[in-house]
Each structure stands twice: as structure tokens, then as C-alpha cells.
Amino acid sequence: MIALISSEEYQKHLNGSYHSGPSHPESPRRVAAIDRFLKEDGLWDDLFRLEPAEATVEQLAAVHDREYVLALERACAAGPVRLDPDTGAVPESWRVGLLAAGGACLAVDTVMAGAADAAFCSVRPPGHHAERSHAMGFCLFNNVAVAAEHARRAHGLERVAIVDWDVHHGNGTQHTFEDDPGVLYLSVHQYPHYPGTGSSSERGRGEGEGATVNAPMPAGTGDREWVGVVEGAFTRAVDAFRPQLVLVSAGFDAHALDPLSGTLVTDAGYERMTEVVRDWASRHAGGRVVSLLEGGYNLEQLPRSVATHLAALKG
């Protein structure tokens, strides 16, 4: 059984009035297109559908500075507001951000309880660029980092792996856990590309050295290179680490048809990478996988990639 965490509430976030709504790549139409496609394709009724609850300030403050969390609440209330050159918010964005992070926590609770084998969080805004103390790159809260820390604090897990195949490096996730040996962060991404981090020399620091594995890929690479690193270097790292839960920052913007990338991944590549992740979880984590939507901005292609990912999660 695959759980789907989704909500029409996710469509209420806008990236501010300066280029809000459909003109911003990270628009409400992204999750609406996914929901519509899953319903039309017949997958909707096969999923264990759950409505998210809001994350608590305590859950957010486990990975973000409390001052940032409270400042973001004030900024949203005064919106529309620009938080960085690419990221904005409106008054509704505060609750939507809470629901995005809360949906990630609900997904963790669901798979840890055995109510589903895996879960996909069709959430927005995305999260992996959000740093401890500031919004960045369309992201307000770092949803996958909140989920990882929730898994450790609420469920007593000692080892959580995060694999990130968004075309953009997850700077916020890496920085959150780079000195933490209990979280393995694996990222394959286009490089050099926004946000400029993610070179292969970034391997973590202190006690976390070696628990960060970056696989930067040049523009023009596709399934052979991306799948190859997931099957190879990432699998070796996962087998050595033995995670008790696998989280996926599932960006689909490395697709050949995505407007924000120069890479050539196809749905066959996403299918195979998902199969490898499922195998990791089967060997080490009781099959438990929680996947969270990050990027993906071609509104025709994104739902197809998500459906491919869900089918591969189901096996």
C-alpha cells in the first residue's frame, strides 16, 4: 500500500504578488496537475490518501532557528512579501508551509506505524533549499529535514538516509546535517547550477564527514549517468550506513523536458532510481520509504513522472 499525502490547501500558496500565480514556475498548478492526472489515470483510488496536519513550531525548530520560524509567520501575515529573489509569500503561505512540513511528518508516522509500505507527499512549497535561518529557492521550510528529525525524535531512529535527485543541489538539507553522522545525505544534481553548492569535495564535516555524498553532473547527462551513480556509489554508501528509513527529495526537474534544467533524465530513469531506493529500503529499513515532491516545472510532464515514481514504489 502506498500512502499519498495531498491537499487542495497546497494550492493557496503564492510566491508573492511580484510574479505570483501561474507566471512563477513554482505555481499552484503543479500539485493540481498531479492530482488531476492521478485521478484520470486511475491511480488515485489505489492510493491510501491522507490529509496533512500542520507541523508544530517545535517540529520546525528542530531544524530551523526558532527566531526564523516566528519571523516567517510575521512576514507571511504582512504579505505579499519577497523573501529572496526567487521566493515570495502571501498570508496563506504560513499555513500552507506548516501543512507541507506536517505532511512530511504524517508520512513518516504512517510508514513507521506500518499503515503503508511507502508514502509520497505531493506537497508545496518544496523544501530542500531552505536553510536553518532563511527561505531560499522557492522553499520556506525544509520539509525533508523536518521529516528526518521527526523520525529520529518521535520514533527513536538512529540512522536516516536522504537521497535527493532534484536537478538543483539541496543546499539546505546538506547544511542541516553535514556534521551529523546519523543522517546520510546523497545528492545527484546538475553542476554548476543553482544554488552553486554540491561539489564532490563536500563530504560533511566533523563527526559527519563522509555522511554527505555529492554526485555533480554536467548539463547533457541523463539516465545512464544518473542511474549509474544511484546504482553504484549511492548504493555502496547506503549498504555501509544501513538506514532504518529512506527519505527521497523527489524533484522531477532533471527531466529532459523541464524548463529549469539542462539534463536529460527520462521517466525510465526515475523508474529505475525508484526501484533502487525501494531495494535499499527492503534490505535495511523494513521497506519504509517516504518521498517528498521537490522540483518539477513542466506541467504536462511532472504528473507523468510522479505517476511513474508511484508505480515503481508500489512494485
Image: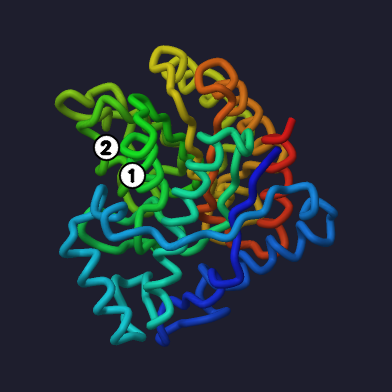
Quadrant assignment for the C terminus: top right
Q: Is residue 65 above or below residue 235?
A: below
Crowd band around label 1 with a 10 angstrom C-alpha radius: few (<14), some (14–19), many (20+): many
| Disc 1 from disc 2: Cα separation | 7 Å
**According to the image, label 2 marks what residue?**
177
Numbered circles on residues, count:
2
Tag 2: Cα neighbours inside 10 Å, few (<14), some, or many (≥20)?
Answer: many
Query: Disc 2 residue type?
Result: Phe
Q: Element under label 1?
A: helix
At a point 31% along the width and 52% down the height, the residue shown is 59
Q: Residue at x 39, y 17 (%)?
A: 241
* Residue 1 falls left or right of residue 181: right
The location of residue 67, given as percent across then percent down, is: 16, 64
Residue under the image location 69 percent in, 48 percent down: 48
Q: Quadrant of residue 301?
A: bottom right
Give the x, y percent position of residue 49.
67, 54
Is the C-beta separation of discs 1 and 2 under 8 Å?
yes
Q: Position of residue 31 (x, y in %)?
A: 62, 65
Q: Is residue 238 above or below residue 133?
A: above
Which residue is pictured at 30% across the width and 55% down the height? Answer: 60
Of residues 156 and 88, the one nearer the viewer is: 156
Q: Which colouring convention does the figure follow?
A: rainbow
Residue on which the image places disc 1: 173
Amino acid, disc 1: Thr
Quadrant of res 214: top left
Secondary structure beneath dot 2 equals: helix
Question: Where does the N terminus fall, quadrant-wise?
Answer: top right
Q: Nearer the viewer, residue 294 or 199?
A: 294
The location of residue 116, given as percent across then percent down, is: 63, 38
The circle on residue 91 is none
